[in-house]
Structure formats: structure tokens, C-alpha cells
Amino acid sequence: MKRIRVVTFQSRKVLSIGGVVLACLILAAAWKLESGDQKIWSWVLGNKVVVIDAGHGGVDPGAVGKNKVLEKDITLAVAKRLQAHIQQSGAKAIMVRDEDEDLGTSQGLLKRKREDLSQRIKLAMEAQADVYISIHANSFPNEKLTGAQIFYNSDSPEGKLLAQSIQEKLNLITNGKRVIKANNEIYVLKKAHQAAVTVEVGFLSNPSEEQLLTKPEYQEKLAVAIYQGLDDYFSKPAVKN
């Protein structure tokens, strides 16, 4: 299996000749990665703020697979791996949740769910996030459906651009063929104050993909793809300007 090596740099100016020389040496060494490794370079995420929303949690399990795999567990596992890559790049990764919990406090389930979603958006707004990544796992009556897919709000050009960037990397790393899709009914995409996407990492309703989503190496692939998509998004002239 192809191994993935992450090489990241913070976006800071080098103020001395010694620093330039050191940077060159690091670059030279980085190019000598072992055969079969996949290099992931990040120059542009430094100082960005990324909110990572692991979907569901606490009293809300989300979708449940045929083999009882819970969506809330898969989303948190992928979110934690994504957080690690983002932090290594010099960006600030803010987790909506980092354990099995929700953000609601009400007793009624419906009211608690609404409160939970509202608090997620509030957290991102207070953090002045540049992007909002909501991670979920899909489920559908047709068990044959597979693959990761990105959803965005059609009223957000930035959201669409972010969705395209991440979908491209997901398809590349997972050999997928899915395309992005607009969905204006998803609460967090309607209410987000920054570029926002929902990343459906796969179908728990497909028994084979359900098992695949529980494997740490596949979760890492998904996290790397999302990370690379973020890097690609922030590299685009329309975003940098």
C-alpha cells in the first residue's frame, strides 16, 4: 500500500541568509523521500482558521451501517486525522467536537438537535473561520451506492470552489468518480458565514464501504484528500486575492 508522507511549511518570511540556507537544505532533503511515498506540500494554509465539524455525536448516532457502524464514530475519526494535518501546516484547526458529544443541552431530541446545529455555526462565527468543513457518512436504500461526495450551497461561489477542490482530491486518492452537488437544505451550509462544504466520506449503507470506513489507513486517505483539497482551494488566485 502506498504510504503517505506529509511535508508542511508555515508561511513565514525568512529574514536571514542562514535561514534561507536551512530552508534549502530542508527542501533538498524532502525531495529524497523513499520511493512509493506520496508527498503533500502545504505553503498556503499558514495562519488560516479551519473549523472541522465531525457530524452528529452524543445522543445522535447519525446513520447506522448494516454491521452497526455508527456515523458519529467515523466522522470523528476522520476529523481528528484532518486536524493533525492542518495543524502541521501552520493553520489553526478548530474541532466542533473532539469526543462523543453533541452541543445541545435540551431534553427533547428535536429541540436538542436544532440547538446542536446552531451552536456549531456559532462556534465557527466566533472563531472567524476561513472555511467550515462538515464531515458526514452517507446512507441510502440502494446498497450499491459507494464513494465520497461533496455538497455545497449554490448561493456560495466560495463554497462551490472549495467543494470542487476537495472532490478532485478525494476522487484521485480513492479512485472515485463522483461530482459535487448543490444542496441548499443542509443547515450548516445555509447558515455558515464562510466557505462551507459537507464531505460525505462514503456510504454506510454499502456493507463493503462500511467496513472500509472503519479502517485507519482508509480514514487517513480521506483526511489527506480533504487536506490537499484545502491547500488547493487556498492556492487559487480567486481566493488569495
Image (tube, rainbow, N blue to C red):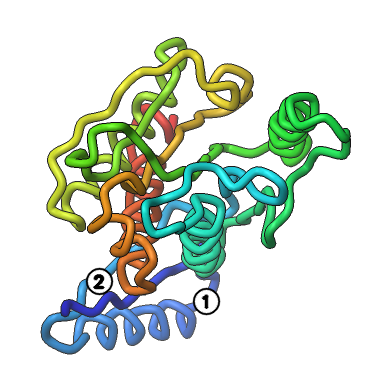
Left or right of 18 on screen, residue 203: left
- Element carrying mark 1: loop
Name the one closer to the observer, 182 or 236. 182
Percent position of residue 117, x then y = 69, 31
Q: Residue at x 27, y 40 (%)?
A: 167
Please identify the quarter of the rendering in which residue 139 is found.
Answer: top left
Three-letter code, disc 1: Ser
Name the image quarter holding the C terminus.
top left
Please tell me whether residue 180 is drawn above or below residue 18 in the rendered image: above
Percent position of residue 121, x then y = 69, 31
Q: Which residue is mark 2?
A: 39
Name the one closer to the observer, 212 or 186. 212
Please identify the quarter of the rendering in which residue 190 is found.
Answer: top right
Mark 2 vs mark 1: give the one in front.
2
Three-letter code, disc 2: Lys
Q: Residue at x 65, y 43 (%)?
A: 60
Q: Which residue is mark 1?
A: 16
